Amino acid sequence: MVTPFALDPQQRAWCDGLRTLAAERLRTLAAAGEPGRVNRPLVAALGELGLLARLFPAEGPVCAMDLCLLRESLARECTEAETALALQGLGAYPVVQSGSARQRARWMPEVVAGRAVAAFALSEPAAGSDAAALELCAEPDPSGGDGWRLTGEKTWISNAPEADVYTVFARTGQAPGSRGVTAFLVPGDSAGLSGRRLDMLSPHPIGTLAFDGVPVGAGDVLGVPGGGFRVAMRTLDLFRPSVGAFAVGMARAALAAAVAHGGERQAFGGPLKDLQAVSHQLAEMATRTEAAALLVYAAAAAYDAGEPGIAARSAMAKLFATETAQYVVDAAVQLHGARALRRGHLLEHLYREVRAPRIYEGASEVQRTIIAKELYR
Ligand code: COS
């Protein structure tokens, strides 16, 4: 019997299969990658194994639940594979959501095959949480025609500067704030586009982009001029629960490690788990992880059903799951003691990985703002 609060047997079997794939096929590719660089063989494998095709089905809409289960399952075994998949999704989803038939035909087969790497370029040095303050300037092309030239900077852009295609949010016209933002599709080899890598706590491919009069035409606009902020927000509505799913996957991996260690490690005349301080901590970790998973699944199911209030539900799922994962990973480290802090330990890796999701795609404080706004709507 399937309750509304559980995955069905087919979903569970799919998740098990994904974990096996991640452990047996993707981990080796991830380990062979260069830290801080786009791992193209890994992205290609995500294409060859059909995972990107599952994310972006040829027919029908993107399924938020599939996206979440993919991310949670991959994260359990291989965070690098999880992140490579997620970044392809975030970078290319605006094309699926708002792109023209020509734009989709140009980019989606390559993205789905894992041959073209995509990226989502919203943040700027002076516009992070306040995304509507972005300043990247799209000026009408001085040589005439219906195009623009992009001038300015983006930063904290995952897959930059190596991506093959960027969804870029820039300011067109005089309209203030969110009203003046337009989304563009910009090939990575465009004239005037450059960038550099950034070295982060966890070595993800991430960097800055500098636009020096990059030419874009009317055919490169995603959606309509002035409609870019909505493109960005609607993309984040889909991806925020899935950041929560990534967090749940990491929390589950940390919990499993802590349960195993608690059962094996001997101290004070017995296994650690016989100490109530330990068993109660494990119980708390398990309970909060379960709650986070349910909130993520509920947000994804609501998204797929087209229910109202999606922005707030997405925000709740991301907020609760990422904060929970931080707590669970930290508690797992504490239960392991110093061994968890050794370079190369699973928990050392997760401890570094778990921090960024509380910041990117809207910091926890931004999620609370979105939720609170909804309360007064
Ligand atoms: N779906 C569709 N439209 C939305 C929307 C959503 N989820 N959220 C906002 N909008 C629309 C609003 O309806 C409004 O449209 P009108 O001007 O036509 O009324 C417009 O967008 C502006 O909305 P709002 O006034 O809420 O914008 P704010 O400037 O107050 O910003 C937050 C809202 C803080 C939510 C936004 O800046 C944000 O998400 N910041 C974090 C950015 C982020 O996640 N960056 C990470 C980049 S990816 S790593």
Image (cartoon, rainbow, N blue to C red):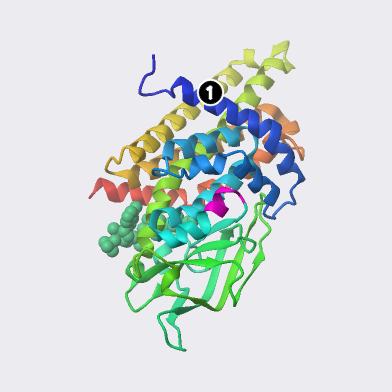
Q: Is residue 287 among what the camera can see?
A: no
Indicate the secondary structure of the residue bearing disc 1.
helix
- Horizontal and vertical percent position of residue 129: 45, 59
In the rendered image, which quarter is residue 138 located in?
bottom left
Q: Residue furthest left?
A: 377
| Residue reaching furthest to the top | 269
**Magenta residues?**
109-114
From what the image shows, is residue 183 above or below residue 280? below
Q: From the viewer's side, name the closer residue of 113 and 344.
A: 113
Q: Which residue is mark 1?
A: 13
Instruction: Work out whether residue 302 can be spotted.
Output: yes
Tell me the crowding category of disc 1: few under 14, some 14 to 19, or many 20 or more residues within 10 angstroms, Cα based: few
Q: Residue at x 59, y 36 (%)?
A: 74
Residue 111 among those drawn in magenta? yes
Picture residue at 42% right of the left edge, 84% below the top: 145
Q: Foreground: 110 or 65?
A: 110
